[in-house]
Amino acid sequence: MVSLIATFLMAGVLAPTPEQAETIATLEDRLMAPCCYSQTIRVHMSTEAAQMRDEVTNMVLAGKSEKEIVNYYRAKYGETILVVPDGMAGRFVYGIPICAFLLASGLLVVGIVRTTRSCSFPHLERSATAANAIDANLIARIREDLREDH
């Protein structure tokens, strides 16, 4: 059946509808080339990628859904065939780096806060003590002046 569809396709008898062409393009962007997993089958120029492009086109023209086609390739190659893994694998691919970044950022903030709190600033302590001493002297003189006036 698939070879018959491929023959008609080559002869130009069967052309994908706009919806089918969109599904084909979407699938070609979702699937990695199995030879090196460095590019999608849409842009990779290997024989494996070309074969997969033909297979995807034939499956779409045969009426298979996008989910069925993705499941077929997932069963054949595993999650690595997908550009963005589905399910738990997808959560791990994106979740672990995000959690690691948030944890590292939190530890950095805690470290900075602890460092700045434990640092002593002697020049600030001296100036605060001097300011208190000046205020105390000023208060004492004001009291004396007030006593003299009475």
Image (cartoon, helix red, strand yellow):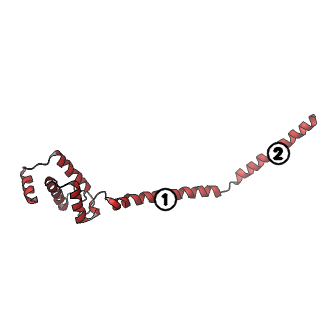
Chain-order first, disc 1 or disc 2: 1
Q: Nearer the viewer, residue 115 or 5?
A: 5
The residue at the far top in this view is 149
Where does the C terminus fall, quadrant-wise?
Answer: top right
Give above or below for 134 relative to 46. Answer: above
- Residue 62, position as x, y percentages in the image: 13, 55
> Disc 1 residue type?
Leu
Can residue 56 be seen by looking at this rendering? yes
Count neighbours of disc 1 (C-alpha within 10 A) and say few if under 14, some if 14 to 19, many if 20 or more: few
Residue at x-position 80% and y-position 43%: 135
Q: Secondary structure at mark 2?
A: helix
Asked which quadrant contains residue 139, the reply is: top right
Residue at x-position 33% and y-position 59%: 87
- Residue 114, position as x, y percentages in the image: 60, 58
Can residue 33 be seen by looking at this rendering? no
**Residue where numbered disc 2 is placed:** 136
Disc sitting over residue 68 in the figure = none
Residue at x-position 38% and y-position 61%: 92
Q: Nearer the viewer, residue 146 or 21?
A: 21
**Residue where numbered disc 1 is placed:** 103
Asked which quadrant contains residue 68, the reply is: bottom left
Q: Nearer the viewer, residue 131 or 75?
A: 75
Does residue 104 appear left or right of residue 78 in this picture? right
